[in-house]
Image (tube, grey):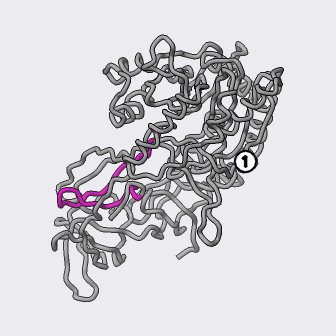
């Protein structure tokens, strides 16, 4: 493969397509009644999450001045909580398009700094998020002129034709594990076995002709998500995969501050067991969470979306400064 | 000691006292899941290969290898002969031990020969080598389309894809890690 050859890297093409995707995303959410916000990137509170490594910002004397966001989640939820309190309820939701930072991640689909789209739909749940994703992706494909002779949106990716018309495939995670990994998921699966089978047996074998939503994840793997009323072993969490690439993750959001605090403490305990340094409990967030209405939030990797839309197999190929 | 984040293709580590080289490497990390470092490892003595998955925090011993700077002399029925330029000692490696590196070996080239417990087991090439094109089809004049390539054969017998402007007699810089064309350098 000729991945890293500079001569066929087309800067102008990437520049134009990046500009286009930002405009499409903004137009889509404005059309849906959302408002765009910008959280600070340098913050004092981040969510303790066992498997997400954060970066600290230090001054020239080596003193910590804050942390770089791994996602704008806490900040956006605080905005929604305050909106609700002051009865400004005639908006459908808020969204942010910004860089986020995750330490120690590097591969053909990972960057330490990448562009994340995150949105929160007020009054909605994770099933509504799946519908929103379907509409957003169809908009993107159409804006990139990716429509077939029947005017259906599609993405040509690495030799596959991915049909982007609704509905996408919706598969319960436990059915995916049974089908592709051959075992029955329970509430507390062994995290190593779970992750190895997810990346080596499930992701590569998911259908390539259609995007796939994997939904209902074990409660131990969704610390900011509401649990299912019908079966609290599972959380109302959904992941979107296209061509085996994890593109987006969302939840029906957990709105109970007491339960959220306990879930964070559980994450902090797991981080300590691994010898890691957990961030402090995010108190401002927890204090304001009591005012948050039912809502659902989704985070989507914009660089990966560009990889798909531009038929590139390395995330560096859609960066302006690879 | 190496850490999981040092793992990459080509790294040599020690497992159960024996040297292994990572021949394939893939970093995987589900958004909310743990980082996994998936490796295909080849035993540098027996050639035995195995798959291993490592996690963040895993530690590795570097392979206990001695590198000796040597000159490549020639190849015959026995294998590839190298000479220590200080002691004039000579060692022989088999074609299998030399592996892909044979595509880039020219008589008198200086390389590092790797020894494990006194036995030569592998060679380590410079990252870039310059080799002459001995066979090339003429390029189409005026064709400047980006990405278009054609095959050429180098003086070592190795064939690779290069841009259309490359001609017979040109000297090319080649990346020995990937076997790919880097650039055309001044004619030798």
Point 53% across, 20% down: residue: A236
Point 33% across, 33% down: residue: A193
The image shows residue A131 at horizontal and vertical percentages of 66, 17
Judge from the rendering whether residue B67 lies leftward or rightward of residue A52; answer left or right. Answer: left
Whether B37 is drawn above or below A222: the answer is below
The image shows residue B175 at horizontal and vertical percentages of 47, 62
Residue at numbered disc 1: A40
The image shows residue A127 at horizontal and vertical percentages of 60, 16
Q: Nearer the viewer, residue A177 or A118?
A: A118
Q: Nearer the viewer, residue B82 or B10?
A: B10
For the question of whether residue B148 can be seen, the reply is no
Image label count:
1
Asked where in the image residue B167 lies, by quadrant, the reply is bottom right
Q: Nearer the viewer, residue A198 or B129?
A: A198
Q: Which residues are magenta?
A: B6-29
Whether B137 is drawn above or below A109: the answer is below
Q: Main secondary structure of the magenta part?
A: strand
Whether A61 is drawn above or below A132: the answer is below
User: Could you tell me which secondary element the residue under label 1 belongs to?
Assistant: loop
For the question of whether residue A266 can be seen, the reply is yes
Point 45% across, 69% down: residue: B129
Query: Quarter of the image containing the N terminus of chain B?
Result: bottom left
The image shows residue B85 at horizontal and vertical percentages of 28, 85
Asked where in the image residue A301 lies, by quadrant, the reply is top right
Point 56% across, 74% down: residue: B187
Crowding at dot 1, Cα within 10 Å, few <14 / some 14-19 / many 20+, comes out as few
């Amino acid at each position: 493969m000729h991945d890293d050859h500079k001569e066929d890297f087309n800067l102008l093409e990437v520049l134009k397509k990046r500009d286009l995707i930002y405009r499409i995303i903004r137009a889509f959410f404005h059309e849906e009644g959302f408002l765009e916000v910008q959280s600070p990137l340098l913050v004092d509170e981040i969510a303790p999450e066992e498997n997400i490594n954060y970066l600290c910002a230090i001054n020239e004397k080596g003193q910590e001045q804050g942390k770089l966001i791994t996602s704008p989640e806490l900040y956006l939820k605080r905005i929604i909580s305050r909106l609700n309190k002051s009865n400004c309820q005639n908006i459908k939701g808020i969204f942010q398009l910004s860089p986020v930072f995750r330490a120690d991640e590097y591969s053909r689909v990972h960057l330490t700094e990448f562009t994340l789209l995150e949105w929160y739909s007020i009054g909605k749940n994770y099933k509504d998020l799946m519908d929103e994703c379907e509409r957003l992706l169809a908009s993107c494909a159409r804006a990139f002129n990716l429509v077939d002779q029947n005017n259906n949106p599609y993405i040509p990716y690495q030799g596959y034709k991915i049909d982007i018309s609704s509905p996408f495939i919706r598969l319960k995670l436990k059915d995916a594990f049974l089908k592709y990994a051959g075992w029955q998921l329970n509430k507390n699966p062994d995290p190593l076995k779970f992750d190895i089978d997810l990346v080596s047996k499930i992701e590569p074998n998911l259908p390539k002709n259609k995007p796939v939503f994997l939904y209902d994840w074990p409660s131990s793997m969704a610390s900011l998500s509401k649990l299912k009323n019908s079966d609290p072993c599972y959380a109302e969490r959904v992941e979107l995969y296209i061509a085996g690439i994890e593109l987006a993750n969302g939840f029906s959001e957990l709105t109970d501050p007491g339960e959220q605090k306990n879930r964070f403490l559980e994450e902090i305990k797991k981080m300590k067991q691994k010898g890691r340094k957990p961030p402090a409990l995010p108190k401002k967030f927890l204090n304001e969470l009591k005012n948050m209405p039912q809502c659902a939030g989704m985070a989507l990797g914009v660089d990966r979306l560009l990889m798909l839309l531009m038929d590139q197999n390395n995330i560096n190929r859609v960066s302006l400064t690879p | 000691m190496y850490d999981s984040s040092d793992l990459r293709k080509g790294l040599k580590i020690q497992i159960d006292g024996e040297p292994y080289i990572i021949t394939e490497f893939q970093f995987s990390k589900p958004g909310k899941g743990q980082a996994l470092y998936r490796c295909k490892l080849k035993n540098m003595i027996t050639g035995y290969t195995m798959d291993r998955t490592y996690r963040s925090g895993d530690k590795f011993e570097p392979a206990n290898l001695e590198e000796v700077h040597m000159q490549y002399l020639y190849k015959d029925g026995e294998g590839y002969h190298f000479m220590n330029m200080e002691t004039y000692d000579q060692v022989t490696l088999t074609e299998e031990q030399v592996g892909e590196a044979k595509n880039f070996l020219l008589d008198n080239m200086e390389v590092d020969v790797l020894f494990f417990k006194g036995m030569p087991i592998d060679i380590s090439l410079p990252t870039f080598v310059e080799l002459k094109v001995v066979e090339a089809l003429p390029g189409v004049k005026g064709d400047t389309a980006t990405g278009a390539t054609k095959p050429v054969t180098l003086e070592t017998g190795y064939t690779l894809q290069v841009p259309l402007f490359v001609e017979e007699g040109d000297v090319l810089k080649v990346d020995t890690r990937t076997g790919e064309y880097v650039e055309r350098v001044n004619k030798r």
